Amino acid sequence: MTKPDQSSDKILARMMALHPKIIDLTLDRMWRLLAALGHPEENLPPVIHIAGTNGKGSTQAMIRAGLEGMGKSVHAYTSPHLARFHERIRLAGELIDEGHLTEVLDECYAKNGGENITYFEITTAAALLAFARTQADYTLLEVGLGGRLDATNVIANPALTIITPVSIDHEQFLGNTLAKIAGEKAGILKRGVPCVVGPQSEEAMEVIEATAARLGAPLIAYGQQWHVWEERGRLVYQDETGLLDLPLPSLLGAHQVMNAGAAIAALRYLGADEAACEAAVTGAEWPARMQRLRKGPLVEAAPEVELWLDGGHNAAAGEAIAKLLASLPKRPTYLICGMLNTKDIKGYLAPLATQAESLTAVSIPGEANTLPADETAAAAEAVGMQAGEAENVLAALEGITDKAPNARVLICGSLYLAGRVLRENG
């Protein structure tokens, strides 16, 4: 039985104190700890490594659903978590249990010997340790930030790499141009290992193609080796193997059609049949990506409201959400928004201004880097929205329902806000 002082929450809290910075991109500390652990990264089931600015998590979820549709067992690593840390580590299809998580965290903490290491690095090492000790057919690794110097970029010979659409985000760490950011994402490419590439701007694609040419890494690229589109309420995918006519993805939004295309391209490379590809698009679940909330205290507080939750937080996400809102049956739409101060607030909100009656800003509870509600409201007004503030999400929801009891309400702006909502909404 796990002792109270060895619980995963307490170990994770200790790990937060091992490095003064939350983000410090280098692989030196990872290599040191992995060596102390006996190099678990060398003993993983075949790895599919996924980088990109938008769509990494959704694409991973669809690949996992497709592989499981083939009867394969799959490890999966993702970040950040929404409600509980355990969500980051899925062992052979199941979320890691408390006992196993505590064991690998404690071992990594001990082997690190008190040396400087970031929270993401040491928890990534714990995930790799758990994966190496549990049998599975595949390992899906989602990059945390960037790619080249990300803690997940320690796999010498993955089975496949994937780069989803690249856009401007995390400029303070990755660079302030698409070319620089694409160069960081392309850092996951490995010599001779194929890479599935989702839709890209010309600037980003040039960098990816140059990196692939230098490494002799074959590209399986959207618009070249594969195509995907929506037609008459169906998803149509085509590559040199042939054409697939599939249902639309269970994950909502036109952008999910593109993510599904990348997932299908990966699955076809891995030998998947049509049934597995259909399982990918119909069976994937990914919380806080235009998720409809149908139960819980927030829904009970506003029973007539159509309540949605999304964690997207950059300009590209704002555009995708705006397109999806425009495609839904017409209904007055209100936003409840909380964001981090590291994001392009106006870039995110500008596309949404055309779809929303107003925005109610909230600060994200417990987040040191939250943008204060008054600054979020000011940014909304600057892009042409009516805006106000509220103490919290429930107060914001009650304020909206007082004037529009049958509204559509989208809680948005940050995965951290989304996680808080999912925890509090039960």
Image (tube, rainbow, N blue to C red):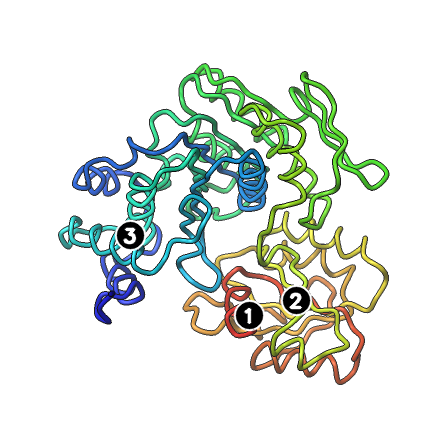
Q: Secondary structure at mark 3?
A: loop
Q: Which residue is mark 2?
A: 293
Q: Residue at x 62, y 55 (%)?
A: 289
Q: Secondary structure at mark 1?
A: helix
Q: Position of residue 403 (x, y in %)?
A: 78, 82
Task: Identify the mark nearer the N-term, 1 or 3.
Answer: 3
10 Å crowding of disc 2: few (<14), some (14-19), many (20+): some
User: Which kind of residue does numbered mark 1 sit on?
Assistant: Val
Q: Nearer the viewer, mark 1 or mark 3?
A: 1
User: Quick check: 342 above or below 426?
Assistant: above
Q: Nearer the viewer, mark 2 or mark 1?
A: 2
User: Which kind of residue does numbered mark 3 sit on?
Assistant: Thr
Q: Residue at x 48, y 67 (%)?
A: 370
Determine which of the numbered discs, if any, sits on residue 114 in the image: none
CA separation, marks 1 and 3? 26 Å
Front residue of 410/249: it is 249
Task: Identify the mark nearer the N-term, 2 or 3.
Answer: 3
User: Which kind of residue does numbered mark 2 sit on?
Assistant: Leu
Q: Which residue is mark 3?
A: 118
Image quarter (top left, top right, bottom left or bottom right) of the C terminus: bottom right
Q: Are marks 1 and 3 in contact (CB under 8 Å)?
A: no
10 Å crowding of disc 3: few (<14), some (14-19), many (20+): many
Determine which of the numbered discs, if any, sits on residue 421 in the image: 1
CA separation, marks 2 and 1? 10 Å
Q: Position of residue 176 (x, y in %)?
A: 50, 42
Q: Secondary structure at mark 2?
A: strand
Q: Are marks 2 and 1 in contact (CB under 8 Å)?
A: yes
